[in-house]
């Protein structure tokens, strides 16, 4: 009799525990998304992280931007090297370097820097993003194809020019929505 009541007590506890877990699971899955804490809202977390990153990049590259606005591209490149020592491999630095070099007329190196930046971070192609450089990249591709393609045809043995044309095609495919 004691054995029977212990067994039935254990089965009863098991059934109650299973019912309680099922109730909790069903209640949690029907929870309104507006009542959830921010940690559960992945979209908001992603947007906040993106905005924080954009603000951080604007802060650390402010001296470079100031030199550019003052019309000192060489000084801007020097400041960019200083910042690059603290943050090596940061895509924004390559974007700015490409922008500066394009303004200085060094098209092949500008293209290479934009390619490097996009391989590190494709967010610069997002149209609505605060870091978007889509328009500048489109203009660079158009300019590069119009200026460099005829030269590449007349000098088919020039390997560096062929590499630059390949990089332009890479940028063109990324603009069209292609991935790496």
Image (cartoon, grey):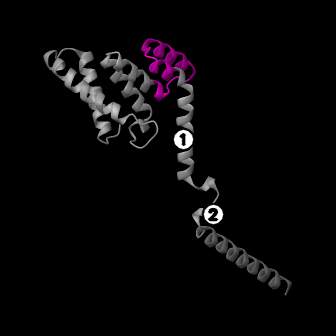
Q: Which mark is residue 35?
A: 2
| Residue 54 or residue 151, whichever sits in front | 54
Q: Disc 1 designates what residue?
A: 51
Secondary structure category for the residue under label 2? helix
Image position, residue 49 (x, y; %): 56, 42
Does the stretch in magenta take in 51?
A: no
Q: Answer with left or right where residue 155 lies relative to residue 137.
A: left
User: Which badge, 2 or 1, is on the more N-terminal residue?
Assistant: 2
Q: Answer with left or right where residue 119 lies relative to residue 7.
A: left
- Quadrant for residue 12, please give it: bottom right
Task: Work out whether 142 lies above or below 128.
Answer: above
Residue at 53 percent across and 30 percent down: it is 58
Image position, residue 116 (x, y; %): 40, 26
- Residue furthest toward the left? 154
| Residue 121 or residue 19, whichever sits in front | 121
Q: How many numbered discs, if any?
A: 2
Q: Answer with left or right where residue 114 lies relative to residue 66.
A: left
Secondary structure category for the residue under label 1? helix
Image position, residue 95 (x, y; %): 42, 26
Within 10 Å of disc 2 (Cα), the crowding (few <14, some 14-19, many 20+) is few
- Residue furthest toward the right? 2
The part of the chain drawn in magenta is 64-93
Q: Answer with left or right where residue 12 lies relative to residue 173.
A: right
């Amino acid at each position: 009799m004691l054995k029977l009541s212990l067994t039935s007590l254990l089965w009863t506890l098991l059934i109650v525990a299973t019912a309680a877990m099922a109730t909790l699971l069903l209640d949690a899955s029907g929870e309104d998304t507006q009542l959830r804490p921010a940690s559960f809202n992945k979209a908001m977390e992603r947007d906040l992280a993106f905005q924080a990153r954009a603000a951080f990049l604007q802060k650390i590259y402010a001296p470079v931007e100031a030199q550019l606005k003052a019309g000192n591209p060489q000084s801007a490149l020097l400041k960019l090297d200083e910042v690059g020592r603290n943050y090596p491999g940061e895509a924004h630095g390559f974007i700015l370097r490409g922008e500066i070099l394009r303004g200085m007329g060094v098209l092949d190196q500008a293209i290479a820097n934009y390619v490097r930046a996009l391989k590190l971070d494709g967010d610069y192609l997002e149209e609505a993003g605060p870091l978007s450089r889509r328009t500048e990249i489109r203009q660079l591709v158009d300019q590069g194809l119009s200026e460099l393609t005829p030269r590449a045809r007349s000098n088919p043995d020039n390997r560096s020019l062929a590499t630059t044309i390949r990089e332009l095609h890479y940028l063109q495919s990324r603009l069209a929505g292609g991935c790496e």
